[in-house]
Image (cartoon, rainbow, N blue to C red):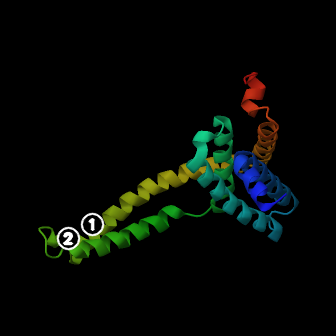
Amino acid sequence: MDTESITDFISAHIPELILLIGGIIALLIVYAYLKDKDSKKYKVFMAFGVLFGVLMIFLCISTYTSWDFFASIVIIITGFTLVIRPFREVHFAVIGALLIMVLVYVLLGGLADTGLSFLAEGWPRIRAAFVVGAIAFMIMNFVESLVKLFGKLFNWWPLLLVLALICIVESILIFTGYGSLYDFITGGK
């Protein structure tokens, strides 16, 4: 096989390849987790899963209209599962709120020569930045809690194992021309 035919094959079978590789990575994560969840191998598989999960989500968002709907949903869920796994315990809401608070404080400094110049200095500037940061924290904390809930559900190793197997079976069915797993189960196509 020359380079052009390999490139043609890959571009013609992107969803299948993404599903297969994502399923294999998820299987490796489950295997390494069950063997020793503190091992370097598990952490390497998780890091590789994050990178490939981002790629899965990006490719699905950018080209999902030409893919099977069920395959796109499985790719998005698997990508999310691989990306969120190492970040389940990180509190992004605090970090994001502090960043927004500092940005608001800096941006309010630019109001010195306007009708809102009272917000450009002193305690009003600090209070306004604090209030905006607190509101941002509440919103991001809610979103973070939702993401953690779904992250814990999808990263429960038995569910991750089932998701990995669904990815691999979906990949094989699409590649062999049988359509989607959804079509195979419902008798469609």
Q: Which residue is mark 1?
A: 128
Is 126 or 183 nearer to us in this picture? Answer: 183
Is 143 or 11 nearer to us in this picture? Answer: 11
Measured as percent of width and height from the top left, residue 70 is found at 67, 36
Q: Quadrant of the N terminus?
A: bottom right
Badge 2 amino acid: Leu
Q: Residue furthest left?
A: 115
Relative to 21, does residue 127 appear above or below in the rendering? below
Is 53 or 69 nearer to us in this picture? Answer: 69
CB atoms at circles 1 and 2 under 8 Å apart?
A: yes
How many numbered discs? 2
Local SS, label 2: helix
Q: Quadrant of the C terminus?
A: top right
Measured as percent of width and height from the top left, residue 159 is found at 75, 44
Is the residue marked by circle 1 packed among few (<14), some (14-19), or many (20+) residues within 10 Å? some
Q: CA distance from mark 1 to mark 2?
A: 8 Å
Q: Which residue lies at the image location 42% right of the left edge and 70% below the top edge?
A: 99
Q: Residue furthest top?
A: 187
116 left or right of 80 in image:
left
Q: Which residue is mark 2?
A: 119
Name the mark on residue 112: none
Q: Which residue lies at the image location 85% right of the left edge and 63% below the top edge?
A: 36
Which of the 4 image quarters holds residue 107? bottom left
Is the residue marked by circle 2 packed among few (<14), some (14-19), or many (20+) residues within 10 Å? many
Measured as percent of width and height from the top left, residue 161 is found at 80, 47
Badge 1 amino acid: Ala
Q: Which residue lies at the image location 80% right of the left edge and 67% below the top edge?
A: 38
6 left or right of 103 in image:
right
